[in-house]
Image (tube, rainbow, N blue to C red):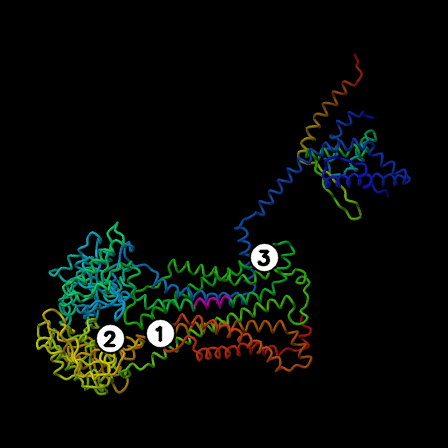
Amino acid sequence: MPDWAQYVRQNLGVPRVQPEREAEMVEELAGQLEQAYAEAIERGMSPAQAETAARQHVADWAALATEVGRSERGRESTLSTLQREAEDRDAARRGAFSPLTDLRQDLRYAFRVLAKSRGLTIVAVLTMALGIGANTAIFSLLDAVMLRSLPVSRPQEVVLLQWTALRHPAYQSVVAYGDCEMKGGTGPATGCTLSKAFLEQVRAKTDLFSGFATFSYSRPMILSGNGPASRATAQYVSGDYFGTLGVRAAVGRLLLPADDTPQAPAVAVLNYGYWQGTFGGDPAVVGRTIHLQDLPFTIVGVAEPSFVSLTPGNADDMWIPFAQRGRLEPVKYPERLEEAGSWWLVIVARLRPGVSRAQAEGAVSQLFFNHLVHAPKPLAKAEDAPAIRLLPVQTGLTGYRRELSKPLNVLMVAVAILLLIACANVAGLLLARAKGREKEIAVRLALGASRGRIARQLLTESLSISVAGGVLGIAMAFWSARALLIFLTSTNPRALGFSVRIDLPVLAFTACASMLTGVLFGLAPALRSMHLDLLPTLKEEPNLSGPGAAGRGRWKSGAVLVVGQVALTIVVLMGAGLMVRTLRNLRSLDPGFQPANVLTFGVDPTLTGLRGDRLGQFYREMRGRFSEIPGVLSAGYSDIALLSNGNWMIGFHLEGRSEVQMADQLAVGPGFFATMGMPILAGREFAAADYSEAAWEPGGPCRNTDRTNTPMAAIVNESFVRTFFPKTNPVGLRFGSGHGEGPDATEGCASPGWEIIGVTRDAKYGDLRTEVHPTIYEPDGSGGIFELRTTGDPRAAIAAVRGVVERSGYDLPLYEVKTQTQIIDELLFQERLLARLSTFFGLLALLLASVGLYGLLSYEVTQGTREVGIRMALGAQRGDVLRRVVSRGIALVGAGAVLGAATSLGVARFLGSMLFEVKPSDPFTLAGVVLLFLLVALIACYIPARRATRVDPLVSLRYE
Amino acid sequence: MFNRELKKGSAEFLVLSLLEARPRHGYDIGKRIEARSKGRIQFRIGSLYPILCRLEDRSLIAGRWVERTGERRRRYYRLTAAGRKFLAAQRGTWGEFVLTINRIVRPDHA
């Protein structure tokens, strides 16, 4: 058969035609010539004749070429148009970037894949839910406490007056309610309570401020007229408080300036939560009369629900105007509160529009300076640089935020670490599963999928897991944040003015966390897929000597993940261990008195109308009756219970020294020292005469000591002696005399200072952690908190106490009934919170890391089955195999422990100030933590190790 | 034997009418024309091939390669929808033309 294709090619010369088209023509013509040739042969011709006959079919090649060329040009233009159209259509379908269709595809595929390995997916989602949920819970707390803005209108205009000075001014008394940062003592001082006199001066500055919202302490009072007598806290506020802040009423009206005048009728505004709880949310409460301290008050309205308090965390039941203070306060807090030396008012003001903070600050600061330095009785020297700073009320009024901020930040770090561990865990899971999917991925790559597409697919899967975990985590967070808040409020004496909500910032946080973690743990498998070697995978080469070259890489990253998890867990456990030890140290601290078996409670007899000496008599009587209760060893009372509510301080001068000294001060009644177990080391206890001399004159603002110009008897502690009268016997020494000083220094009262009659042991007063301050104990029989020392459980005496009070004939409720141990526990609430929560998270982390370790070893055992079989066939004992697996596990834990120990040393530094008597690098804690982990790890290793020993060599050798 | 011009003019018409019944390949078309006309019209490959290219270019016919086992692959042609319409139109015209030519050609009996 002649080569017709060659023949055609040689003769056909169509100019300007594509090579493919030319090939086509050649083929077609050659085919036809071939047919002609075959036919001729059939007809009986010889090959040579047939060839000639066929050739005759195309006589004129040139003419053919011309004809074809003409039509070719036409066809080409048509063809190229058609081709281009087809290409465009294809491109449009493929899409340079059509994210939506691709995303839908990816999601559908992801769900299918995840549904296939249900077990793994559930574990992964739960793990993520745990990690994300913990983070969301703590963040929602953080949001409620730290981030949420104050419920006032245009808060950027509202400022707090915060005073500063290089040395604290010579105020007579300063009260702080924990609203803002306050520093006293020696050295630079600051605070936010100011005097009424100064307030008057600032109020005059109407050019700077459009309104004022001043407030002071909140007094617990006896509320009657709404069922049985109960206690309520009421905060004194100025008449323009609500108006300046822009708070609205839920029912009725709020306080007005007219309510804050001396002749105004007594009115009160209820807190929304208190109204709901105690008055059942009854709108008819408006206009009702209640009795506070037996004085009638009319409820005029309820504040809106979002306004719990101005100072975060300091929630009170109601607000009453300052003008009512005079009627409500027992004679113990006389009119001296009007003095320039009594600083007890918190001043919050709204800047006039157009007035800048700097402008107003300068003016008010100057005012303050003059007020202190150029006063008839100067309270500060010019070189002390007393000044006022106008802080935005959001940052200035820290309230309870200060106490909660550090623990919350620590907890955020802890749960962030927990999340990292969870991610590492899930990454490990996905990596292990990736091996099973290698074939699938290789096939897809061979079929033309781009590596980027595969990676995107894997990321979609991991994001699906993390988003599912996030949604579940929100539910977990909501429940646990509530539980947490209940824990916080139950162990805290003050009602917490925070509401935990899952609102927008929290949801946004959770969404971000989910996305980030999904990418984080999805990255490892995704990157791995991009470097997949196609050929070996598709050929399914068997694992010859245990892990193949490709396999080894994955095991390494699996091991790295486990080591990382171990390290992070060690860090969290270390933090937990340190907090637990801190708590133990604080609890076992010797407070200087005997806190065990002491019951404390208050009875407020002001409702009885008793005043002055009759009040003192009442208390002495009650004390006597209490000590007669069987089981009660002794009874006493003091102004406030030790370690319960901060401490009072007082300023005084020493002989020949011009600067003001500060000391803690506590007024105590008879029996106090004996009941609290505080020995008198020198001198004597207070005698009846001391009490009567120190008592207030009937009806008058001064004490008997002022009249007789004799110094008040005082018992001081060792610290006081060490600080002010070192190396002398202080008994009999006087101080504060000649300066018109004393606890009662107002004009008109002589206040001849104190005389030391006894020295007692140092005892903690304000808080546990700080060193004991110099303390002055004064005799004051007029009442306070009772302390009873009992033989057994102090709570057993409560019923008997109530009985005694009832029999006294007065209808007085008991309040703040707590044991001294309970009081100390409440003080330690921050430490308890941290210890408890960090231990919880630490154990969670331990669980996760152990599961991760177990998973990795389990996987390695499965992969290395062949190797184990060979070893056992060659004579290895089961014990050897066991040891190999366990030692691998221990090696991983060891590496992680070293890494974790090093990291925790750095991280624990953060805890610094929160620790007590334990160093961040405490070796015992570290050793304990590592041992704990090793123990748990041994169990995690043992199970896969046992599985490895059960391998039948014959089976494993056949295992592929 | 019809003369060349006539053949050329009617060539496309012939090819199209042959493809009306079923798709055929190039050589087959030539054979059929020869058979139908009882040898009076013969189309060589060299003459037929350009016609096929032209018709395909004008989308009156569509060609595709067909591969059968044991054979070299061949290009088959079929009539397109446009081709059918064209054919129908041509038939009408041809009929007229033939009549006219016949009148011209027949000797005049005057």
Residue type, numbered disc 1:
Glu
Vertical position of residue A945 compared to residue A548: above or below:
below
Region rendered in magenta = A415-423
Comparing A789 with A300, the one in front is A789
> Badge 2 is on which residue?
A816
* Marks 1, 2: nearer the viewer: 1
- The residues tagged by marks 1 and 3 sit, at their Cα atoms, a distance apart of 49 Å
Residue A755 seen in render: yes
Badge 1 sits on which subunit? A
- The picture places residue A49, in percent across and down from the top left corner, at 90, 37
Of mark 3 and mark 2, the one earlier in the sequence is 3
Residue type, numbered disc 2:
Glu
Mark 1 vs mark 3: tell me if same chain. Answer: yes
> Badge 1 is on which residue?
A831
Please give left or right for residue A150 compared with residue A321 in the image. right
Comparing A251 with A215, the one in front is A215
Comparing A724 with A342, the one in front is A724
Label 3 SS: helix
Mark 3 vs mark 2: tell me if same chain. Answer: yes
Vertical position of residue A32 compared to residue A323: above or below:
above
Q: Quadrant of residue B106?
A: top right
Residue type, numbered disc 3:
Ile
> Badge 3 is on which residue?
A454
Vertical position of residue A954 compared to residue A14: above or below:
below
Badge 2 sits on which subunit? A
Residue A228 seen in render: no
- The picture places residue A382, in percent across and down from the top left corner, at 21, 63
- The residues tagged by marks 1 and 2 sit, at their Cα atoms, a distance apart of 22 Å
- The picture places residue A952, in percent across and down from the top left corner, at 65, 78
Vertical position of residue A861 compared to residue A38: above or below:
below
